[in-house]
Amino acid sequence: MKSEEFDRQNIFGQGEENKAYADYFIGKSYLNPLTDSSKKPFFANVTFECGCRNNWHIHKAVSGGGQILLCIAGSGWYQEWGKPARSLNPGDVVEILPNVKHWHGAKKDCRFSHVAVEIEGEQAKTEWLEAVSDEDYFKL
């Protein structure tokens, strides 16, 4: 996809480099908060460079919680532990239940952007885990 087309689809904008969470990503990502991060639900546009993906992680919660991804630009992947990866394109929605190990990110040859919605939950927190290996990622 040409850069101009991606930027047109990425209606909320790329935002700033995601340095606060860089340790949990392979590659470069960008974060554009759309709502106040201290309030739930929290909405943020996340943009991934080609080949960028986050580590395996779990949105833990005693009750409630989880995350929703609203895919808006480019093409990416979502995968839950033990399941095949799902291809993501603009218009796709992913409902991530709490306490499910998963990862998401761009395909190797395309940037990707989604709006991440953090769902309010009791004792909700994200547990960051191991990186998605190059071997597993490049098989997709």
Image (tube, rainbow, N blue to C red):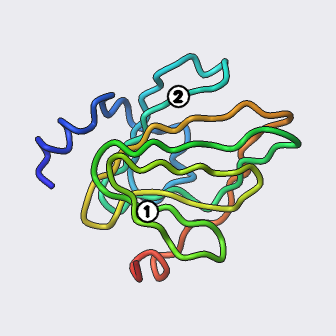
Q: Is residue 119 left or right of residue 115?
A: right
65 and 93: which is toward the camera: 93
Determine the residue positioned at 79% across, 38% down: 64
In the displayed structure, would residue 58 be above or below residue 67?
below
Where in the figure is residue 3, as x and y percent of width and height?
Answer: 14, 46
Residue 26 circle label: none
Which residue in the rendered view is the most extreme toward the right? 62
Mark 1 burial class by Cα count in 10 Å: few <14, some 14-19, many 20+:
some
The image position of residue 131, as x and y in percent, is: 58, 66
Q: Tell me the number on the disc at residue 43.
A: 2
Amino acid of disc 1: Trp
**Going by the image, does 3 lie left or right of 98?**
left
Indicate the quadrant where residue 115 lies.
top left
Residue occupied by mark 1: 77
The quarter of the picture where residue 113 lies is: top left
Q: Amino acid at mark 2?
A: Phe
Residue at x 38% of width, y 50% of height = 28
Residue in the foreground of this view, choosing between 21 and 89: 89
At mark 1, the secondary structure is strand
